[in-house]
Amino acid sequence: MEVIMAKYGEIALKGLNRSSFEDLLVRNVRRRLKPLGEFDITRRQSTIFIQPLSEDIDMDMAVKKVCSVFGIAAVQRSAVLPKDMDEIIRQGIPYLADALERAKSFKVEAKRSDKKFPLTSPQIQQALGIAIGEAYPDLEADMHSPELTVMVEIRDKAAYVNAEKLPAAGGMPVGSNGNALLLLSGGIDSPVAAFMMAKRGLRVDAVHFQSPPYTSERALMKVETLCEKLTEYCGDIRFYCVPFTEIQEALRDNCSGDYFTVIMRRLMLKIANRLCERGSYGALITGESVGQVASQTLAAISCTDKAAEYPVLRPLVGMDKKEIIEIARRIDTFETSILPYEDCCTVFTPKHPKTKPLLKDVLAEEEKFDFSPLIEKAIGGITVKDFKLG
Ligand code: ATP
Ligand code: MG
């Protein structure tokens, strides 16, 4: 029998209610695994034990999914063996055959949380080490930098044997740090921003501003595909789609093109503020990164920020495009993001946007037209769609 042992770091528990943190983490693991079949999931001694309840469950996939749950620091796939040294040797060595054949050197590390087990940890290490040495005479014992570390853990119910500790997603369980609203475009950056903030334990919903007929149905579908892909990491996502055409047209017709982008961003934030009030989100998230484009200079960001009534989290602020793309590939949003459909930002983008707008000039320009009725109308026209994990 095999089990997945998922470990979470003690550090992540600091300052949080430990047991509710653990319950949330178990719930998140349970939901992530649901599409794969039935599992028995319990937690003991800072470890979540995940045991498949049927033979046909794809364990490689299960391991992969558990590794991507935020809050899990490391994952071990182990044999569950009787708490008997002879059995541990008899069944454990064949279980580890693949790993033992591949390695040149090894050591055994034992941990015994059941102090009633007759052998001490060093004795367990010695017994299994000698047996492995006999079965694989070419394999060298190396206490300092072995290629392979065989782990034996003697716990309450059984002995667990494994040879590989896989690094997992880290971070904190989604939902442990409150809710935030992501401004989701169809680009590369904002989905990555969602991933980064979910990693810090935020539950993320998304708002998208759409400008039909300037933007097509396919552009919207692209954003919805991104939402769907993000559920893999973020869990359930509520998606708000805001009709933004009239606002953009009014902006084009009434305000100087130099300020188009910065005012447009401010109007997006004003609508997002309202969604925050309604949906009790504690912050906004964007995919902005300093200096990336004209609208992301410090001066422009500062003018945009003044329209926000909530903190604007910009997890990509100090990252290079290359680093952002690496993550986008890893979370499988990149290929969707680069599909060539138009975005509401590009539709009216002026030739020479001001890179150093002053707030007073932006406000003067913005006040040339009363956007509030159009903002109300846009808010009234918001459509909501729920994307569920799995
Ligand atoms: P992205 O790759 O996320 O589109 P970008 O590099 O293209 O970012 P901008 O187009 O300047 O940068 O957008 C900056 C941020 O503003 C985006 O990351 C996103 O958070 C938000 N944003 C832009 N357009 C929209 C939109 N149509 N709907 C919702 N949010 C948007
Ligand atoms: Mg964009």
Image (cartoon, helix red, strand yellow):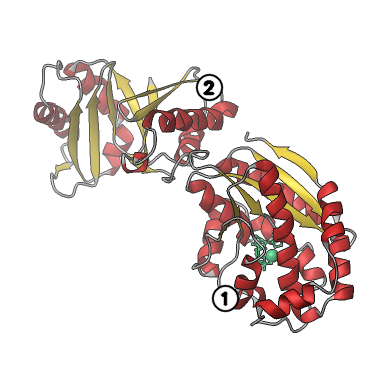
Q: Secondary structure at mark 2?
A: loop
Q: Quadrant of the N terminus?
A: top left
Q: Observer-nearest residue: 11 or 192?
A: 11
Task: Look at the numbered disc 2 and say if its residue's Cβ is closer than 8 Å to ligand 1.
Answer: no
Crowd band around label 2 with a 10 angstrom C-alpha radius: few (<14), some (14–19), many (20+): few
Label 1 environment density (alpha carbons within 10 Å; few <14, some 14–19, many ≥20): some
Q: Nearer the viewer, residue 378 or 135?
A: 378
For image coordinates 68% across by 55% down, the residue present is 184
What amino acid does circle 2 point to? Asp
Q: Residue 2: where, in percent of width, then height?
A: 38, 23
Q: Answer whether residue 324 is visible to the viewer in this image.
A: yes
Quadrant in the picture for the C terminus: top right
Q: Which residue is mark 2?
A: 56
Residue tagged 1 = 298
Seen in the image, is 65 located left or right of residue 210?
Answer: left
Q: Disc 1 residue type?
A: Leu
Q: Residue 281: image x %, image y %?
A: 61, 45
